[in-house]
Amino acid sequence: MLEIAQSTSFQAYAACSAALIFNLLFLAGSTAVARSKAQQMLNPEDQKLNAEGTVVSGDADAGARYVRAHRNALENIPMFLVAGLTYTLVSPPETIAISLLAAFTALRWLHSFAYLRGVQPWRTLSFGLSSLALLGIAAHTTIIVFTT
């Protein structure tokens, strides 16, 4: 096993990355379930599988909110995957690293649930705070790289 894989910071990063991948899979699956329950589909060829379903688009789509939540996660989680890995490679203090990595992960899950339920101000707060955690990861990486 690589030495980096034995560091607590990297192990926290790996666990957070897995949790965020589960978040993306959850959102993708939730979209399909919402559309299935509403017997809605986006593609006309899908009516071959469900003749009673209707083809929808835009706001009529029961899965539209799920798609928006999923898109938001897809815009933010890849940045974490890159920044978090880079962060662990510069050997940050473990307590700070674990705090920032876990905060981003927990806040992104909170954001997903708040988005799906349409709950404000939690959706905006969790988005803003997760962005601050990601900014903290990037800033701390930069500080470590240029001061050591």
Image: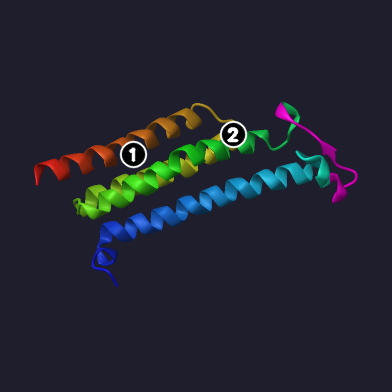
The image shows residue 124 at horizontal and vertical percentages of 47, 28
Mark 2–mark 1 Cα distance, whole angstroms, equals: 21 Å
Judge the density around disc 2: few (<14), some (14-19), many (≥20) Cα neighbours within 10 Å: some
Residue visible at 28% across and 49% down in the picture: 86
The image shows residue 42 at horizontal and vertical percentages of 75, 38
Residue ID for mark 2: 68
Residue visible at 85% across and 51% down in the picture: 49
Q: Which residues are magenta?
A: 47-58
Residue ID for mark 1: 134
Work out whether residue 143 or residue 126 is closer to the camera in this orientation and state it. Answer: 143
Q: Which mark is residue 18?
A: none
The image shows residue 62 at horizontal and vertical percentages of 73, 36
Q: Residue furthest bottom?
A: 1
Mark 2 or 1 closer to N-term? 2
Work out whether residue 35 or residue 42 is closer to the camera in this orientation and state it. Answer: 42
The image shows residue 63 at horizontal and vertical percentages of 69, 38
Residue visible at 63% across and 38% down in the picture: 66
Relative height, residue 93 to residue 57 (above, below): below
Residue 47 position by quadrant:
top right
Judge the density around disc 1: few (<14), some (14-19), many (≥20) Cα neighbours within 10 Å: many
The amino acid sitting under disc 2 is Arg
Residue 52 horizontal side relative to residue 34, left or right: right
Name the quarter where the N terminus is drawn: bottom left
The amino acid sitting under disc 1 is Leu
> In terms of secondary structure, where does tag 1 sit?
helix
Residue 83 position by quadrant:
top left
Q: Residue furthest right?
A: 51
Q: Residue furthest left?
A: 148
